[in-house]
Image (cartoon, helix red, strand yellow):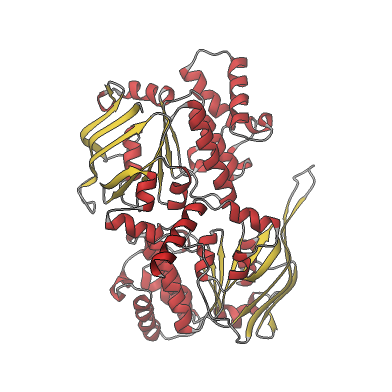
Amino acid sequence: MTAVLDIRGLTVALPSGADRMNAVSDLNLTLNAGEITCVVGESGSGKSLSARAVMGLLPPKVSVTGGEIMFGDTNILTLSEPERRAMRGEDMAMVFQEPMTALNPLMTVGRQIDEVLRIHTKFGRKERRQRILDLLTEVKLPTPERIIASYPHQLSGGQRQRAMIAMALILDPKVLVADEPTTALDVTTQAQILRLIRELQERHGTGVMFITHDFGVVAEIADHIAVMQHGVLVEAGPAAQILNNPQRPYTQELIGSVPSLVPRKREAVTTRTVMTVSDLSKIYRSSGGLFGKAKEFKAASGVNLELKRGETLGVVGESGSGKTTVARCLVRLLQPDTGKIDLDGVDIAPLNRQGLRPYRNRVQMVFQDPYASLNPRRTVGHILTEGPMARGKPGKDAHARARELLALVGLDPKVEERYPHEFSGGQRQRIGLARALAMEPEILVADEPVSALDVSVQAQVLKLMDEIREQLGLSVVFITHDLRVAAQVCDRIAVMSKGEVVEQGKTADVFASPQHEYTRELFAAIPGREWSSEMETHAAAVNA
């Protein structure tokens, strides 16, 4: 194979005061034309900064201090900034993790793609427009004429990511760097984007450097794999070799942390019902402006759920399925339009703020993004004691309980004097869990609590939540779009689509024989499903 990019001894230095001297140390990596090389590792492994070094997009105070990045016979590290800018458009392109932050919100999608052509080509206006329409069709965006006239916020997450891919491929680059391009996407949209990248890469003969921490994605598309830890390349080779016979303990640990698709055996929960949801509906209404017509969107419609004491009920579905709306109704951050939420014989659905006060502590929420939900100006101790003290608990007792909870979630009680930004993502999620537990709830509603975490940290948090559920006798409503996670933590699951529960039952039963077409589509879209099945079959044979 022809190498389109050859990274030799790349070293990227971090600013003074960082947790280590180098973000990347002596990295050697070759990217071949027409192949996808997946660079895998946890947060802080150096994989994204390696990609940004290739593109010349390193953040301030982070710099390359050694090595070469060869594009053909050219060491691109020796080029001037104008030369690198020209190369970024014509020879190399990048697809970013979050297109909403990478796209200009004040420009239409068509204008942003057109800008690349205006700067790097001599095409006329009509020729540029036709090329954009052709490429939007190639990346399978519906109604390209509408897309080019739309602003980023008017598109879905999957459509924005397709637009980003179109922008990256508009000049037919030889190298495409994709930095976690599917992390924030639902499983079916993720499957479509992965299939699209593979098709385009094969059609254009592009060498793809694909950054990810998801081994399911790796198994789906990788030709070669490079595993990084703390800025060092620990293992590299053909995909089949790394996936099926990893040599290094770190690689084995990462692969071992991938949740199984086989639901684990759980004893049936036969205790009393603590919450019953009946015919729950929520409609979002938007004003049509001065002359427009008001619009309505049914986020949840006729939802029926039952939660038993000590049980974990999973609510699964894609973005827009209504699962987060249901979660926020259960903790009464939203008031449903119709239906009942029976909490031990009391319907909390119609209660006003004052009427809810006696019941607030009984149902608590763990949010998806702990950094956004924790007050950055308050210490951990203040965050954990604020709720209990507002309900009349003496400060001394509240702080003592806060220290107990920090120990319970696996943190040193001394960290109560620190602020949220001083912790990692996994540690912040533990703090969010401790905050919810500080109110001594009977029910935890966990909204995608591990979706933003690395696979090994994800495994730790899931294990912790399960241990705490058993220890405290909690009931959990677990919101997720990841069926692997649902298989490992949920006793029963309810599948939502377009605001309705289309299927529910015991987790093992639904996984063994999904009845609804939408549920079957979700299972079919799981990345790396065949590899997971092979791994699980092999493990079962070894243990037999």
Asked if residue 156 shows in the view, the reply is yes
Rendered-image quadrant of the C terminus: bottom left
Tell whether 208 sits left or right of 11. Answer: right
Residue 447 placement: quadrant: bottom right
Q: Is residue 105 visible?
A: no
Q: Residue at x 57, y 65 (%)?
A: 479
Q: Residue at x 23, y 54 (%)?
A: 19
Residue 351 in the figure: left or right of residue 319 = right
Counting every numbered tag in the picture gives 0
Instruction: Give the image quarter of residue 427.
Output: bottom left
Q: Nearer the viewer, residue 220 or 19?
A: 220
Say which of 353 and 126 sits in front.
Answer: 126
Counting from the top left corner in percent of width and height, residue 272 is at: 62, 87
Where does residue 145 sit, x and y in percent of width and height?
68, 29
| Residue 350, quarter of the rendered image | bottom right
Coordinates of residue 119 in the picture (x, y in percent)? 47, 19
